[in-house]
Image: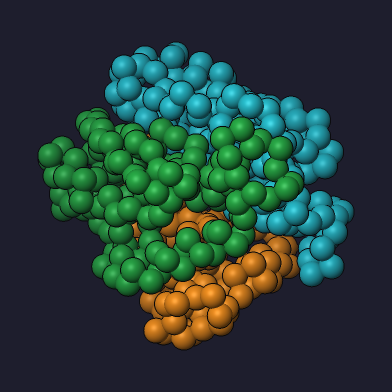
Chain colours: A cyan, B green, C orange
Amino acid sequence: MKQGTFTEVTRQRGVYDITEPVAGVVRAAGVETGLCHVFIHHTSASLMICENADPAVLRDMERFMARLVPDGDPMFEHVAEGPDDMPAHVRSVLTQTGLSIPITAGRLALGVWQGIFLWEHRARGSERRITVTVAG
Amino acid sequence: MKQGTFTEVTRQRGVYDITEPVAGVVRAAGVETGLCHVFIHHTSASLMICENADPAVLRDMERFMARLVPDGDPMFEHVAEGPDDMPAHVRSVLTQTGLSIPITAGRLALGVWQGIFLWEHRARGSERRITVTVAG
Amino acid sequence: MKQGTFTEVTRQRGVYDITEPVAGVVRAAGVETGLCHVFIHHTSASLMICENADPAVLRDMERFMARLVPDGDPMFEHVAEGPDDMPAHVRSVLTQTGLSIPITAGRLALGVWQGIFLWEHRARGSERRITVTVAG
């Protein structure tokens, strides 16, 4: 197997398209038929495969999560790093820490409307480390 | 690795059992110990592993999702394809686009009560393409 | 590929750290660069990668789920095994039945704050079977 890592610097809460750096690791690996695994080494940012054409989809996704897991919810006990701390962990658990995507004919076999996104859940952002593993 | 694809035609929102076509790809691959990965190439239908014995579980799953992510929610900006458009994307992100299942002794090592399901989230259904990758 | 299985006996609803038994299977496999897949053979308990330092995070996670998917919800039709039966299936679908984690330099490449957890969703607990598959 081949592995590559990269860091995405997020400056605020929101969704960041990482399809291209992931696809780059796949191209470099030279695997014809296989699997690509993407992993984020954090518990307050996560991954998702989502619609990649209309930016309003990503804004709606953020709106939905902000309502489902409100910052500053008085129910939360773990508030050491502020009102967005525990919501960031919950949002991560409700989405994905790892994704696997088939490789077909040497390329990521994403659907036409699928992109790979990093979802930063902390208000102020961070440096997020991602490992891509290619098996074939 | 070996890959197979199939298409599931869904006629309306709801849950469709795809355990058998997935198991068929695994049998054909002839892998004794390995992993089976199932991927859906769409962002408005998704996958889940769920209880396979009582159809009421699947109806309750749909009821829960319909309440959690209501169609026509005025919060949503992305409404190009109707009131079920954005909810379909949210439901997909809250469930799975890809699933991995161990292969043991040449067979999918699902638990007794586990089935593999495609969850169609669009009201009118669609043709959904699925890729199964077998590694061993 | 190499596989190992273990059983976790849960005595009540809640979160159980299984990082160490999973890491043990990885060490025994002797893979330098690869992937570790963890699978739970049940539909009323699930897996997650979550913050591993402050036990309050796990209590908050349970509080959040208890409010999102309340026991005894009159909407649910599948109540054969009691008020926590259908909520356990929903909680499982909203989290993970399988997880994949990269292996780097012979070890699970978890982030500093990441642990692997089994989440028991049934009130009285059970015996939960887990399969770990190592590919490299």
Vertical order, A37 against B11 (above or below): above
Q: Residue at x 68, y 67 (%)?
A: C64
Q: Where's residue C80, x and y in %? A: 39, 84
Q: Quadrant of the N terminus of chain C?
A: top left
Residue under the image location 32 percent in, 22 percent down: A104
The residue closer to the viewer here, A102 or C116, is A102
Closer-to-camera residue (C21/C119): C119
Res A82 visible: yes
Q: Image height check: is A16 above or below B128?
A: above
Which image quadrant for residue A116? top right
Vertical comparison of C102 with C93: above or below: above
Q: Nearer the viewer, residue A114 or A72?
A: A114
Q: Is residue B75 left or right of residue B23?
A: right
- Quadrant of image for the C terminus of chain C: top left
Q: Position of residue A122 (x, y in %)?
A: 78, 43
The residue sitting at 63% across, 73% down in the picture is: C66
Q: Decide which of A27, B75 is in the foreground and name it.
A: B75
Q: In the rendering, at what x and y percent does residue C58 appear?
A: 66, 66
